[in-house]
Image (tube, grey):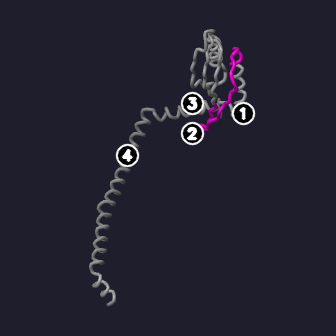
Amino acid sequence: MKRLITIFSVYKIFWSVCGLILVINLMIYWGAITGQQREIERLRNRYSKIRAQQLQRGEANGSGKRYRIAEQSLQTFMDILPPMDMVSEKARELGEIIQGQGSETGVMVFKPKRISDIGMWRYAASITIKNRYENIKKTLAAIQNSSSLFCIEHLSIKKEGPAGQVEMKLVIATYCR
């Protein structure tokens, strides 16, 4: 014990500085950090109360019902989508529609992309078609009147020459489950 007192008395300045640093750290913790923790808890409680009020108001004005109806509509849409193994038939159908108007295209390659949020697949192809303007209009009408779901995502038409030929660039997509 006497040895500890000797060590403390010899290194009095060192131990005083260490004690002062400890006291300052404790004051900062109690003053700043615990104050911030109380403020965070107060804000969480306030948010919970406000959110509960908004949910009650939402149920009162029917917004919860709208979400349920939208969910049912999305599920109905998903149920009528064809399965993924039908993509080749969709590509063949689109090719027949385009060639039925005397148009020529290159090879159509449908690239898949998963829409992960809802478990759906998007298959898109970029197509260039050259034909007369009247036949291009008929091709677009045939795609629109098809019983399959084809979404035209991009369409551009450019005049190709004096003979009435036009070039149509088309990005078309279909969806599967």
Q: Residue furthest bottom?
A: 2
Q: Amino acid at mark 1?
A: Asp
Which secondary structure, mark 2?
A: loop
Q: Amino acid at mark 2?
A: Asp
How far from the left and from the top, in percent, is residue 124? 63, 30
Q: Nearer the viewer, mark 3 or mark 4?
A: 3
Tag of residue 169: none
Which picture quadrant has residue 7? bottom left
Q: Count neighbours of disc 2 (C-alpha within 10 A) and say few if under 14, some if 14 to 19, many if 20 or more.
A: few
The residue nearer to you, when weighing 34 against 42, is 34
Tag of residue 73: 3
Q: What is the number of callouts on the image? A: 4
Q: Which residue is mark 1?
A: 85
Q: Count neighbours of disc 3 (C-alpha within 10 A) and say few if under 14, some if 14 to 19, many if 20 or more.
A: few
The residue nearer to you, when weighing 89 against 133, is 133
How far from the left and from the top, in percent, is residue 134? 63, 10
Q: CA distance from mark 3 to mark 1?
A: 24 Å
Tag of residue 117: 2
Tag of residue 49: 4
Which picture quadrant has residue 98? top right
Looking at the picture, does residue 45 appear above or below residue 61? Answer: below
Magenta-drawn segment: 98-123
Which secondary structure, mark 4?
A: helix
Q: Amino acid at mark 3?
A: Ser
Which secondary structure, mark 3?
A: helix
Check whether the beta carbons of the residues at disc 3 and disc 1 lie within 8 A of each other. no
